Image (cartoon, grey):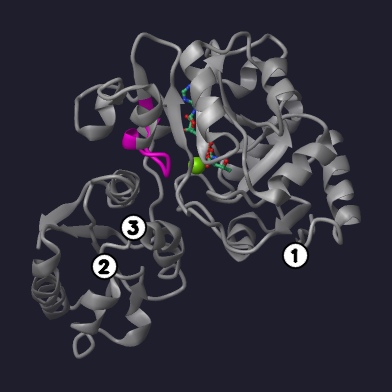
Amino acid sequence: MQTRCIKIDNITASKEALHFAGELIRHGDVVAFPTETVYGLGANGLDAEACRKIYQAKGRPSDNPLILHVANRSMIDQVAAKIPEKAEKLLAAFCPGPITLILPRKSIVPEQITGGLSTVGVRMPEHDVARALIAAAGVPIAAPSANISGRPSPTTAESVLVDMEGKIPMILDGGACDFGVESTIVDATGEQTVILRPGAITKEMLEEVLGEGSVVIDPALVGADSVPKAPGMKYTHYAPKAPLTLLEGMPTRMARGFRREVARLQSEGHKVGVMASHEVLAELKDLVPADMMADYGPQGKLPAIAANIYEALRSFDEKDADVLLGEGTTSEGLGLAIMNRLHKASGFRSIQA
Ligand code: TXA
Ligand code: MG
């Protein structure tokens, strides 16, 4: 299959291409498209056979449910049996935006895409290309991140092409994604509101709407020995091809810690790739060749780091580094989402700087 990549700079000027992409979705095909978080791999969310193609293209385990992308409130009512009061508040505060709400599902949603669960994840993206595509398709669009299962999520059309070339007919190229980490998944159906996957909508932001102390993070995400409530969170994920180890600790200790580790690994004969802040990389120039460095942004600038981590990790896949070192951030605010992805990308291998 040939994969067409179509640049969408302007919704009005690209009306025909969007109409065509909507037709593809309606006819059961898969189209990759940008959202404000990461690129998605979309298919008609009410068509089990179309969604089967998503699982196939990604190599995704069939028990890992897909989330549905909607353009408006009436599409939510089409797929959700009920919207609990707390979910209603979150909807008003954060939608459209980088949040996915877990809601009781209606039977119109095929059980093949919800992994047999009685709930469905619903997300109303803010990105104008995503919104235009959903409108053109006229159906809720099921879309996981557009990577091969287990790999870092793509935040550019080029990275989607690397993973999906020859597997899907079309990629809509809307440029780089703003947030760079996937949506915050929130289950507000029970007594307690639970974050199943941290993202750009932070615990603090949710508590501003629902009340202080009313939101918890799924204990499985922060080290507890239990199964995560979002089935996808139990899999290895976001991993670059070479093994990654994180350096964690005080920002002021980072450069020294990196120098020590890089020197140790190099003395063992390794080709070391480093993903870190401008500040740390500046201190490594005499040790690490420029093409073995990936700059993820200024130290402590969490939005910039979130936007860059997946592309930075992917940048090593075409290079011959055989081990990678990455700089950890704080776990406060948006740092929780960043560190969640980095811990998974590293298989929880980390050392103190
Ligand atoms: O930002 C995003 O959410 C991106 C863009 C494309 O919208 N999508 C995305 O989808 O990250 P995906 O499939 O890569 O991640 C969705 C996560 C998975 O971990 C899945 O297990 C979980 O959501 N999930 C889906 N439905 C669920 C449900 N009913 N209950 C609990 N977790 C669910
Ligand atoms: Mg994913």
Q: Report helix, strand or loop for mark 3.
A: helix
State the image quarter where residue 228 is shown: top left
Q: Residue at x 63, y 20 (%)?
A: 112
Horizontal and vertical percent for residue 96? 60, 37
Asked if disc 1 and disc 2 are in contact, CB closer than 8 Å, the reply is no
Badge 1 local density, few (<14 within 10 Å), some, or many (20+)?
few
Give the quarter of the image for residue 104. top right
Question: Where, by quadrant of the figure, is residue 258 drawn?
Answer: bottom left
Residue 290 higher or lower than 72, as above or below: below
Sooner in the amino-acid sequence: mark 1 or mark 2? 1
Q: Which mark is residue 302?
A: 3
Q: Position of residue 7 (x, y in %)?
A: 75, 65
- Say whether residue 13 is visible: yes
Q: Residue at x 52, y 34 (%)?
A: 94
Q: Describe the element under mark 1 as helix, strand or loop.
A: loop
Q: Is residue 274 magenta?
A: no
Answer above or below: position of 153 versus 308: above
**Residue at the spot x=54%, y=16% of the render?**
103
Q: Is residue 310 left or right of residue 112?
A: left
Look at the numbered disc 1 and say if its residue's Cβ is closer than 8 Å to ligand 1. no
Cα gap from disc 3 to disc 1, whole angstroms: 27 Å
Q: Which residues are magenta?
A: 195-204
Q: Which residue is mark 1?
A: 9
Where is residue 187? Give x, y as percent.
43, 21
Q: Is residue 202 magenta?
A: yes
| Callout 3–callout 1 Cβ contact below 8 Å | no
What is the three-letter code of the residue carrying label 1?
Asp
Quadrant of the snapshot with the C terminus: bottom left
**In front here: 230 or 75?**
75
Q: Amino acid at mark 2?
A: Gln
- Taking depth in this image into account, of 205 and 112 the one nearest to the observer is 205
Residue under pointer 2: 299
